Amino acid sequence: MFDESIIDEVDVDILSSPSKRRAELKKMGQIKPVGNKFVNKVLVENMFRLFGITFFPLIDPTDLKLNDTTQKIEVTRQMLGIRFEMFNEEDSCFNNPFYVLLKKSNSTKDKTNVNNNKSDSNDNGKWVIFKHTIPIYIDIEEKMRDLETQDASSYDEIFIFAKEVYTILLENMERRKLLTKMEAEGLIKNLKNDFESTSISFAVNKIKIQIYLEKNIILSCSISSGMPDEVLKAKWETILNGPLDELEFKIKQLK
């Protein structure tokens, strides 16, 4: 999962252990740079996080088991964390991240059998959602089930799953950002937005407007009050439909 060209810099050991990470951070704070050599691994990790989707290893303590033969602690189920981070250009900072934690539906015994058969361990068991902080309007369980018809155990399929979830989160953020910007500029007021940013109401002067979106397209619009002329009202309810990024220009014409 972790490319060999970057694994030495990312240092997955400190990612899977918070205590080791704190110790490493403290140690690195005492290191002096030598010439142009880049020694701060955390900055390298942050650089990769700028791309929006990052994966990280982790271990559930309940999945640790003592091997009676070797007397070594073994992990009975693989885990993989997915972090989603979106940069908000308006605030020049990242929004709070979302997380999905996956577990493999296999065991140490299964892994041994797979290794004995010299098969790819990715073919053993499927990734299942263990915990997540994704908003409820995204049915990630359904998106994970969509992978079951293919190979939901492969990293490629998990990356496709992650990209689909990230795209929905990003589209929602962009919708909210556009509407908030319009309110800040005084084009609209009394903005009310549902959690998914698909049912939105606002006022333009005394005109109260309700719009319904699918992704970034306004599918329908209704004017509840403020425009007594029924012909003009019907006209504007039609005009305001269409791409969301055209709404700002249309509202300016309405004002």
Image: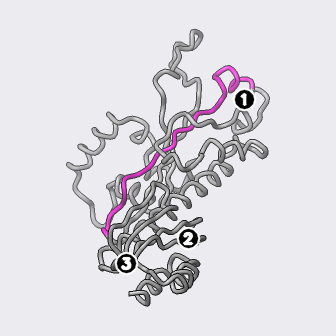
Separation of marks 2 and 3 at Cα, in angstroms: 20 Å
Residue span colored magenta: 91-113
Name the mark on residue 202: none
Assess whether residue 109 is covered by the magenta stretch: yes
Residue at the bottom extreme of this rendering: 253
Q: Which residue is mark 2?
A: 216
Residue 34 in which image quadrant:
bottom left
Q: Nearer the viewer, mark 2 or mark 3?
A: 3
User: Which percent across, then down, holds residue 69?
Assistant: 59, 10
Q: Amino acid at mark 3?
A: Val
**Disc 3 element:** strand
User: From mark 3 to mark 1, how far is it between C-alphas?
Assistant: 66 Å
- Which residue is tagged 1? 115
Residue 99 placement (x, y as % from top left): 47, 45
User: Which residue is rendered at x = 54% and y = 78% of the image?
Assistant: 237
Q: Residue at x 49, y 40 (%)?
A: 132
Please report whichever mark, 2 or 3, sits nearer to the chain's N-terminal start: 3
Q: CA distance from mark 1 to mark 2?
A: 48 Å
Q: Are marks 2 and 3 in contact (CB under 8 Å)?
A: no
Q: Judging from the image, what secondary structure is the residue with disc 1 in?
A: helix
Q: Which residue is mark 3?
A: 204
